[in-house]
Amino acid sequence: MPRAPAKFRQADIARALRAANQCDLNVEVILEPDGRIRIVPSEVRTSPQVDTAVDIRL
């Protein structure tokens, strides 16, 4: 019993993530059942935040 052809490939997802990374965006990738790859801006930061504020008390 043959399989149906893939609607998207790993390379397609990697290409989408690489493009978002080059634009310095936090995105969420949604794979739709019909084969569409949706890239949605994400409010959640997955990387740790670096606090650069310094509190100096004399």
Image: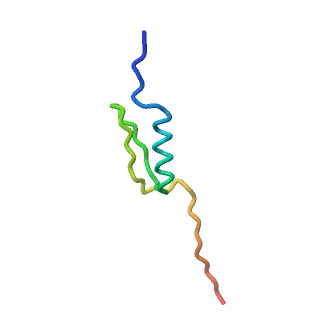
Image spot of residue 54 (x, y percent): 61, 78
Q: Position of residue 20 (x, y in %)?
A: 46, 50
Quadrant assignment, res 31: top left
Residue at 35% x, 36% y: name it.
36
Residue at screen point 44% across, 51% down: 27
Residue 23 left/right relative to 53: left
Question: In the image as oriented, which residue stretches furthest toward the top?
Answer: 1
In the image: residue 4, left or right of residue 51: left
- Image height check: is 10 above or below 54? above
State the scheme by which the image is colored.
rainbow
- The front one of 39 and 53 is 39
Looking at the image, residue 21 lies above or below residue 49: above
Judged from this view, the residue extending furthest toward the bottom is 58
Dividing the picture into quarters, in which one does residue 50 lie? bottom right
Give coordinates of residue 21: x percent, y percent.
50, 52
Q: Position of residue 41 (x, y in %)?
A: 40, 53
42 vs 57, nearest the viewer: 42
Instruction: Please identify the residue farthest to the left as the structure is shown.
Output: 34
Q: Report the residue at 38% width, 49% height from top.
A: 40
Q: Is the N terminus in the top left, top right, bottom left or bottom right quadrant?
A: top left
> Left or right: 50 with respect to 7?
right
Instruction: Please tell me which residue lies in front, 19 or 57.
Output: 19
Is residue 29 depicted above or below 2 in this figure? Answer: below
Quarter of the figure that contains the C terminus: bottom right
Q: How many marks?
A: 0
- Name the residue located 39 percent from the left edge and 19 percent from the top edge: 4
